[in-house]
Image (cartoon, grey):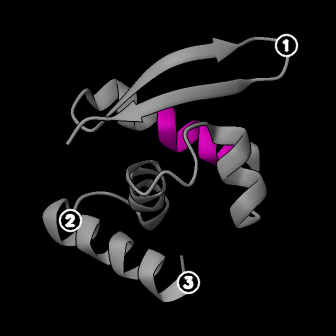
Amino acid sequence: MSDGAFMAAVEQVLQVYPDLSKLQAAVVAADEMDIAHDGRIFARIFGVAHALVLRQANALDEAGALLRITKREPRTMRTHYVVSL
């Protein structure tokens, strides 16, 4: 996967869901493209603070539309999620 293909996927998510932040759209796109299915992996791959990814995943989960948190690991704060478009 190229950077351009990923950014195109993020833009496509933003076109369909314009109220999302770019980071939220990136989380959705990464899950859909089988790049990352949990916050820690996403943070490591994209060089984003894990706390920021968790905040965005939680916000999406609370909104109840695009992302559902499936598992939380309290010790590591790893949060697994699945996108349901």
Is residue 54 shown in magenta? yes
Q: Report if residue 55 is visible in the image.
A: yes
Q: Residue at x 37, y 37 (%)?
A: 60
| Predominant secondary structure, magenta span | helix
Is disc 3 placed on a helix, strand or loop? helix
**Crowding at mark 1 (Cα within 10 Å: few <14, some 14-19, many 20+):** few
Q: Amino acid at mark 2?
A: Pro
Q: Is residue 54 left or right of residue 27?
A: right
Label 1 vs label 3, nearer the camera: 3
Q: Amino acid at mark 1?
A: Arg
Distance from Cα at disc 2 to Cα at disc 3: 21 Å
Kindly indicate whether the residue at mark 1 contacts the one at mark 2 (C-beta within 8 angstroms).
no
Residue nearest the viewer, comparing 60 with 38: 38
Question: For the magenta stretch, what is the residue range?
Answer: 51-58
Is disc 2 placed on a helix, strand or loop? loop
Distance from Cα at disc 2 to Cα at disc 1: 34 Å
Q: Residue at x 85, y 13 (%)?
A: 75
Percent x, y of residue 59: 42, 35
Q: Quadrant of residue 33?
A: bottom left
- Residue that label 2 marks: 18
Residue nearest the viewer, comparing 54 with 29: 29
Percent x, y of residue 13: 26, 64
Relative height, residue 54 to residue 47 (above, below): above
Q: Amino acid at mark 3?
A: Asp
Distance from Cα at disc 1 to Cα at disc 3: 32 Å
Percent x, y of residue 76: 83, 22
- Residue that label 3 marks: 3
